[in-house]
Image (spheres, rainbow, N blue to C red):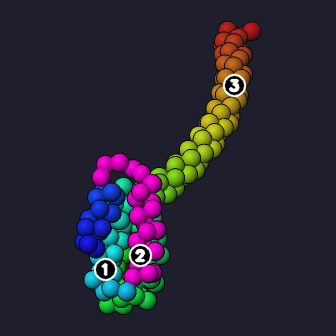
Amino acid sequence: MVAVAAVAVLGACSGGKESKSCEAGENAVITKLQHCTNPDSISVYVDQAKAYAQKLVNEGKIDEAKAYLDKITPVVQQKAPALVSTLETVKTAISKLPGQVADSTASTIGDVADSIAAKGKDVKDATVEGAKSVYNSAKEVGSKGIDAAKEGVSKAKDGVANTADHAAEAINNALGK
């Protein structure tokens, strides 16, 4: 009779439909465990609890599965301490699921990406500042070069004028004027 009831509850929760019967099954198993005195029935109810936790895991509700097992463990401890190790094994297995590792990895990757983006912005800002500095330096050097060139041209003009004056004077001296 107990086996038939267990199959009925498992069948209701393991089908494709999402229904309140599964949520009721969660609380029903706890209630059944609290009122049960038959060790065989307790074992069946623990199996139902494991099946319900597996259903939650299959739906991607890993934290809910852990919470459910944490909720049911004290009742099992009270009624059938020997079965607690079964629930602990299931909890341990759930804690090692790839979904949690993937969530943790995704979070870490997100943190790294944010860090890289921040560093990229810092590099961009430093590059812009460096470029401005190079531009200003080049502008200053260019300005000084232009000023020096202007001064050189002015001195060259003066030199040409002096050379022309000296040449004229030398010619005049040579002609005897």
Distance between the Cα atoms at labels 1 and 2?
A: 9 Å
In the picture, the quarter occupied by the C terminus is: top right
Label 1–label 3 contact, CB within 8 A:
no
The prevailing secondary structure element of the residues shown in magenta is helix
Instruction: Answer with mark 1 or mark 3, whichever residue precedes in sequence.
Output: 1
- Of the residues under marks 3 and 2, which one precedes in the sequence? 2
Indicate whether residue 17 is drawn in magenta: yes
Q: Tag 3: residue type?
A: Lys
Residue 96 point in image, percent of width and height: 33, 71
**Front-most of residues 126 and 98:** 98
Please check the rendered image and state whether residue 96 is part of the magenta-colored stretch, yes or no: no
Q: Dot 3, crowdedness within 10 Å: few (<14), some or many (≥20)?
A: few
Circles 1, 2 touching at the beta carbon (< 8 Å): yes
As drawn, is 101 to the left or to the right of 118?
Answer: left
Instruction: Check disc 2: other Cα within 10 Å, few if <14, some if 14-19, many if 20+.
Output: some
At 46% from the left and 68% from the top, the residue drawn is 27
Q: Nearer the viewer, mark 3 or mark 2?
A: 2
Q: Which residue is mark 3?
A: 150
Measured as percent of width and height from the top left, residue 23 is found at 45, 60
What stretch of residues is rendered in magenta? Answer: 15-36
Hey, what amino acid is under mark 1?
Ser
Return the residue at label 1: 41
Which residue is most to the front?
1
Label 1 and label 3: CA atoms lie apart by 106 Å
Q: Amino acid at mark 2?
A: Lys
Mark number, residue 32: 2
Decide if residue 158 is on the left or right side of residue 91.
right
Q: In this rendering, is residue 3 above or below 80? A: above
Give the distance between the C-alpha atoms of the residues marked 3 and 2, in whole angstroms.
103 Å
Residue 53, placed above or below residue 38 = above
